[in-house]
Image (cartoon, rainbow, N blue to C red):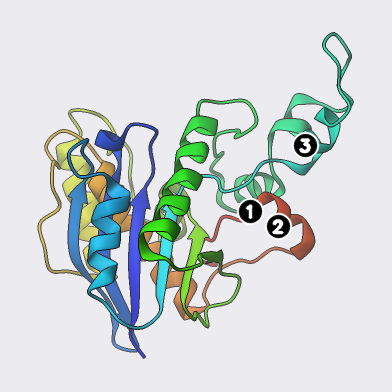
Amino acid sequence: MTINIVGIDCASDPRNVGYAFGTFSENGTVVEGAALGSNDLLPAQAIADWLSNRSGPTLLAMDAPLGWPEPMAQSLVNHNAGDSLAGSANYLFRRETDRFIRERIGKQSLDVGADRIARTAHAALELLESLRHLLQRPITLAWQPEVEGLRAIEVYPAATLVAHGIESTGYKAAKGQEARERVAHAVGSLIRIDVPIPAMESKSDALDAVICLLAAHDFLWGKVMGPEDQALATKEGWIWVKEC
């Protein structure tokens, strides 16, 4: 069975969103398109346009937190200004998946409870809601590789690169084109990239979207690390990364 996959490098500014389209099957993953967002063609509309011409199940792989730390949520329910908060900042502002990725991969994702990534998370959830409206279809999170309908997962390109042993130093820098080309070549040895990746000379957004497709590829093969506490992951979200 062929599964449509969409990689989305989320951002609060549509111009900084990268997205990539592909397909997954028993023969592997093929990248069919990659683009950057704009104010003229918003990412949600571009993705909806592509999906409207496709049949079969679809998996969205999104580089953004899709949930918030449960301890923070519980601490704020009855909190009043000036009151103390029980627990350390790391305990309150980081999710279990953030701690897990740090322990297993050695990469520290940004704290959705404290960093600017919270705005990206909000934008990602808005994008999901826009897609639900445009496509008139429900979108729920996937927890197993057997995908039906339209599902989404949270991914983290930097951790995916580490899990695959891909050297990525400097690939996000404005002048990091050589590093980006090196990363793209390595990713292309794992999934087939049949199209050019835009703006490689100046930014990594579209490349990150392609790496999201690699993370989706790992998820659909069932070669990823899942949560031990499913109930907590359902509340906070979970970053899907290849076993290593």
Circle nearer the viewer, 3 or 1: 3
Label 1 secondary element? loop
Q: Which residue is mark 3?
A: 73
- How busy is the neighbourhood of tag 3: few (under 14 within 10 Å), some, or many (20 plus)? some
Question: Which residue is pictured at 11% across the width and 63% down the height?
Answer: 195
Q: Quadrant of the C terminus?
A: bottom right
Q: Picture coordinates of residue 35 (x, y %)?
A: 18, 51
Quadrant in which residue 123 is drawn: top left
Q: Would residue 66 appear left or right of 90 to someone viewing this image?
A: left
Q: Would residue 157 appear left or right of 114 to someone viewing this image?
A: left
Question: Which residue is pictured at 39% across the width and 71% down the height?
Answer: 217
Q: Verify CB contact (< 8 Å) between mark 1 and mark 2.
A: yes
Identified by mark 3, the residue type is Ala
Question: Which residue is pictured at 63% across the width and 53% down the height?
Answer: 237
Distance CA(mark 3)–CA(mark 1): 13 Å
Quick check: 71 above or below 184?
above
Label 2 secondary element? helix
Distance CA(mark 1)–CA(mark 2): 5 Å
> Residue 35: which numbered mark, if any?
none
Circle nearer the viewer, 2 or 3: 3
Question: Which residue is pictured at 62% across the width and 56% down the height?
Answer: 238
Quadrant in which residue 185 is drawn: bottom left
Sequence-wise, which precedes: disc 2 or disc 3?
3
Identified by mark 2, the residue type is Ala
Pick the front one: 144 or 215: 144
- How busy is the neighbourhood of tag 2: few (under 14 within 10 Å), some, or many (20 plus)? many
Q: Which residue is mark 2?
A: 233
Distance CA(mark 2)–CA(mark 3): 14 Å
Q: Which residue is mark 1?
A: 237
Sequence-wise, which precedes: disc 3 or disc 1?
3
Q: Picture coordinates of residue 207 (x, y %)?
A: 25, 49
